[in-house]
Image (cartoon, rainbow, N blue to C red):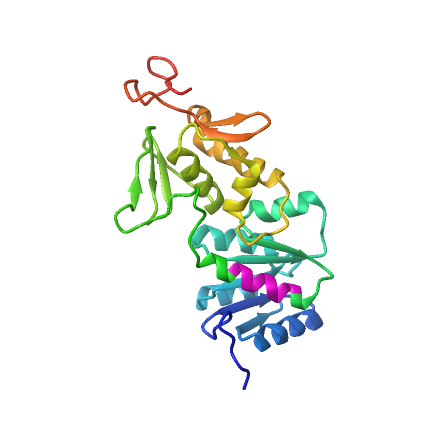
Amino acid sequence: MTEQTPEAPKSKRILVAEDDDNIRNLLTSYLSVSGYETISVASGSAALKRLEQTRFDLAILDIMLPEANGLDICAKVRAHHDMPVLLLTALGEEHDRIRGFEVGADDYLVKPFSPRELVARVKAILRRSTSAQSARLPASTGGEQKYTPPYPIQMDWECKSARFEDRELQLTQYEFKILAALTRRPGVVFSRDELLDLLYPTGASVVLKAVDVHIHNLRAKLGPDGAKLVQTVRGFGYKAARIEPSKTSSPVEGGSSWK
């Protein structure tokens, strides 16, 4: 019987989706020895079926899975909950990594890799996913399930949702975190490095452009008027525009009230 470690209690269940038998068996073996409960599958369709039937604490997905690729599965996972996802791939180009983080991956490991490194990353992801969020990001508390910044926007921490004027925004977890951090501290400039630490606290090897991708997508979802809320500070990073409480919350009526 395998001795369990404090960092990897048996209650942590991991899905391993990898079509290469040797890699899948190796990963399953290393994770099991480290104290994790693992369920492994060899195809994307099998992974989706397992995710519908079983609660997992983390999913390890090979991008090039047959029947349904890891990127599509990651996007579907992210649309419903915040379970961490680690992507495995032989693709190591910058745009490939950005694509992985854009669909919501928490970390990205390029083949060939050391199984020990993968286990270390899994431990880091699970440990930090249950820890408090960055001090720069307001934490959700029992008395602060919602907050309304001085904009026509409302953030709901319990439901992980946001509304702009009367429209609900379909945000990824990363877009939600960025919008929450910026609007909670209007006028405060967040560097790209700070936003990376906020979005990927596991220390994943992420390029700075990943932040720009999330900002671009966030602005698109806010629309032409709402996009003015998120401002670029050249050479530094991003901030939420300030607004004078005495002025209308609409940037359209009576001229722009954001600055």
The answer to which quarter of the image holds residue 122 is bottom right
Residue drawn at the location 55% of the way across and 83% of the way down: 2
In this picture, which residue range is highlighted in magenta?
117-125
Q: Is residue 245 at all visible to an observer of this figure? A: yes
Query: Is residue 258 found left or right of 112 in the rendered image?
Result: left
Residue at the far bottom: name it.
1
Query: Could you tell me which quadrant the N terminus lies in?
Result: bottom right
Q: Residue furthest right?
A: 112
Residue 123 belongs to magenta span: yes
x 42%, y 43%: residue = 137
Q: Return the x and y of residue 21 as percentages of the image width and height.
A: 69, 72
Q: Is residue 2 above or below residue 228?
A: below
Residue 54 colored in magenta in the image: no
Position of residue 97 measured from the top left corner of the image (x, y, whole percent):
65, 47
Give the quadrant of residue 15: bottom right
Q: Residue at x 30, y 39 (%)?
A: 147
Total of numbered circles in the picture?
0
The picture places residue 174, in percent across and down from the top left corner, at 49, 44
- In the rendered image of this protein, does residue 171 appear above or below residue 61? above
**On the picture, is 30 further left or further right than 7?**
right
Q: Position of residue 165 (x, y in %)?
A: 33, 30
Vertical comparison of 167 with 234: above or below: below
Q: Quadrant of the C terminus?
A: top left
On screen, residue 116 above or below 87:
below
From where the camera sits, is residue 43 visible?
no
Depth check: give the residue in front, 68 or 183.
183
The residue positioned 43% from the left and 55% from the top of the image is 81
In the displayed image of the protein, which residue is found farthest to the top? 254
